[in-house]
Amino acid sequence: MTHIPAKAASSSVSSGSLLLTLMKARTFIALIAVLIFFSIAAPNFLSTANLILMSKHVALNAFLAMGMTFVIITGGIDLSVGSIVGLCGMVAGYLVLNGIDLQFGYTIYFNVVEIALITLAVGILIGAVNGLLITRLNVAPFIATLGVLYVARGLALLSSDGRTFPNLVGKPELGTTGFGFLGAGRLLGLPVAIWILIVVALAAAYLAKYTPLGRHIFAVGGNERASRISGVRVNMVKMFVYMFSGFCAAIVGLIISSELMASHPATGESFELNAIAAAVLGGTSMSGGRGTIGGTIVGAFVIGILSDGLVMMGVSSFWQMVIKGLVIIVAVVVDQAQRRLQSRVTLMQMAKAG
Amino acid sequence: MSAAAAHDVILKLEDVSKVYSGTVAVKRANFEVRKGAVNVLVGENGAGKSTLMKIIAGVEQPTLGRILLDGEEVSFSSSGDAVNRGIGMVFQELNLFGNMTVAENIFATREITNRFRKIDRKEQERRAAQFLERLQAGIRPDMLVEDLRIGQQQLVEIAKAVSLDARILIMDEPTSALSAAEVEILFKVIADLKARGVAIVYISHRLEELIRIGDYITVLRDGHITGQEEMKNVDTRWIVRQMIGSDAKDFAKADGHVPGEEIFRAEDICLPRVTGGMAVDHVSLSLRAGEILGIYGLMGAGRSELFDCIMGRHGQATGAIFIAGKKVKERDTTRRIRRGLALIPEDRQREGLVSILSVASNLTLASLSRFVRLFHIRGGPERQAVTQMVRELAIKVADPAQEVSSLSGGNQQKVVIGKALLTGPKVLLMDEPSRGIDVGAKADVFRTMRKLSRDGLGILFATSDLDEVLALSDRIAVMSNGKLTGMFDRAEATEAALVAASALGHGPAPHTESP
């Protein structure tokens, strides 16, 4: 008597779990699908030159998406990253061209390493402002970072009256040359930007998995109250994720300015949306607690390859936007379906056992 | 149950089960609701009463089982469905829109409109005034709900449910915020509804209330229905026995070890309540190493709030705490945990666990620094600690990497306890440690408490279960209304003395006006 229902239950559970495995690997499956599709549909897609170019495009979004992933895992959102990219680019450009005027006839010029460090510090500082607004003043993350989005963009425009800082070659006598290395330099045949991405991504993935801070980021997103009672310093964790997001945005600002050898104050507009899209595509849950750096990087690659591939196929940019939007929506729908399936499988098991 | 035929069964639940992640809230319940009668439902906290009612009201859908209304099977996909079939509910937690007027709240989702589909405010207020009139509460229909006292809000909620003209009206603890006079009015309204043939399902903790107005009684324990009777055949003793269970609980025996030096002392702990008054009112107590001090009290006596103050969760709390004679100056939870305090919170889902993380991550969440070299969590020692805890507490889990929400309630509770123990506490605060877990897990938890006290931990545990506090404690403190109203040695404590102390400072029975 009891054999039949037990069997039925176990078979439905196992078919459910196969579907679950497929759904969990969906981003990776999507990546392979777009790679195969474009290598057939677009000529020259698989050429080395094209792959390297594409990975440079992807890298910019991937940096932002990594910072965004940690923020979203804690249950927040960071809309200000695009503006931080713009502002940090302007800071770097300003320092290369003008240095800092000390008001009594002296001007300090920094070398390129110092400029990079100062720019990163600016990005982290803006992230800290986000964090303080959210933790100390209890502003909702969406609103706090929206405000900072406007402020940072405004400051970027003010820094040059809306003009571009051109020609960031620097002067040898001031020691400000070499700014182009970040954007155009290569090590062992790979662009420097890619190497930086690899280093930062490995560090972030390590942080997420093997450090108390990483564990706490997930705990805060999963249940803030329980984390607090367990002694997790919730405010510190939140400060960190916004500062890390600002740091990632500063890197992107540096790389773009260095690539173009110019800083434009409108750089980075709507980058935050691509970053959110990559994180979500990579399986980060907007309600917090779930997400991986690896998934986010794959998500960034899917979006990047999709848009570059469509360009190579000659698809109009208007259609590209439609397709990108659809991909994001499908990703989230599948994500929700997976959650529901998963909880139903466990609940049914428990109901039968209890 | 021969006289039961006097009232027809209007609604019947058959073999209904409801499972939430991690807990089976209701197990194969069979429940009948009779017309023109007050059907009382009673049980301890977490027994599944509210869940059962939410299923009837269409707020929750049963995982298994079926619902029969007038003999035909129905399924409600939303509370709107249930309302359409004549089922109304007064919720325990108020479901009102504070930013709207009383009349707008009463007619929310079924607004009265004129020919042009415009809301007819005058008519709504006129009709609302009629319902409010019957409740004699002095509430005007054009008042904003957020300007009303909690008790008045509860009356609005009741008026709203009455205005539905429901055939079945569910009231989940409708009197919890009412004054004695307001309760009397409510009872009049209930009698009136009964006379009109409405079936009333009434949930309350106040036994004397139930016996006064109930016609039929159903007792729930741990999600099971343990008794169903006509009210005139039962007495308080019967109800309590059904609620707590006649099967003697498996309390671990005291082993006769002698408590050591004082390990913890709280002095003059005060916590003001937002609404005025004190949630914790000048409480001082001391605890010796290896001692179990039970804190008995009813709901809202301030036990959980006292624990919160001790853990440093309220910035506005005053008073001092000492561990092993040294004053604890740290005010935040993180550093108090490091000083040797640990809390097992009452609400496992909301405060105890991060349900989407694994069993292992939950166990070590509070004690990660133990496994860290520089900034790296060493996998070996962490896994070892997890395995050891799983074994020591007999947590039933196939693989510690499993999500904690897939465990049963009892095993989840053990994970929360394990998390606290891994911080290496000197003093353990346990808030209702046996709530909502099955008998076997309860016994395990009690055995663990004994073992810990033998190892020299000081344990403060709060409970509203008399048997539990009498069986496990070396000493018993009683709290009522935020104050410490009694302190008994195990030998001199009696049920009657505890109950008397736990009622101090509360309003007397509903017949007299409370101050």
Image (cartoon, rainbow, N blue to C red):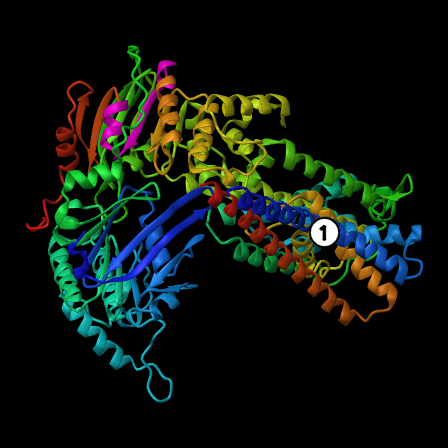
Q: In the displayed structure, does residue A237 sit left or right of residue B340?
A: right
Residue B434 against residue A266 in the figure, above or below:
above
Residue at point 63%, 56% (across, down): A152
- Tell me the quarter of the picture where residue B292 sits: top left
Give, as a single range, the part of the protein colored magenta: B452-472
- Tell me the quarter of the picture where residue A173 sits: top right
- Tell me the quarter of the picture where residue A330 sits: bottom right
Residue B184 against residue B429 in the figure, above or below:
below
View extreme (bottom): residue: B115
Decide if residue B268 is in sight here: no
Chain of the residue under label 1: A
Q: Position of residue B380 (x, y in %)?
A: 63, 22
Q: Secondary structure at mark 1?
A: helix
> Label 1: how many residues lie within 10 Å, few (<14), some (14-19) or many (20+)?
many
Q: Position of residue A146 (x, y in %)?
A: 57, 58
Which residue was labeled with disc 1? A27
Q: Position of residue B297 (x, y in %)?
A: 22, 35
Q: In the displayed structure, does residue B125 sit left or right of residue A123?
A: left
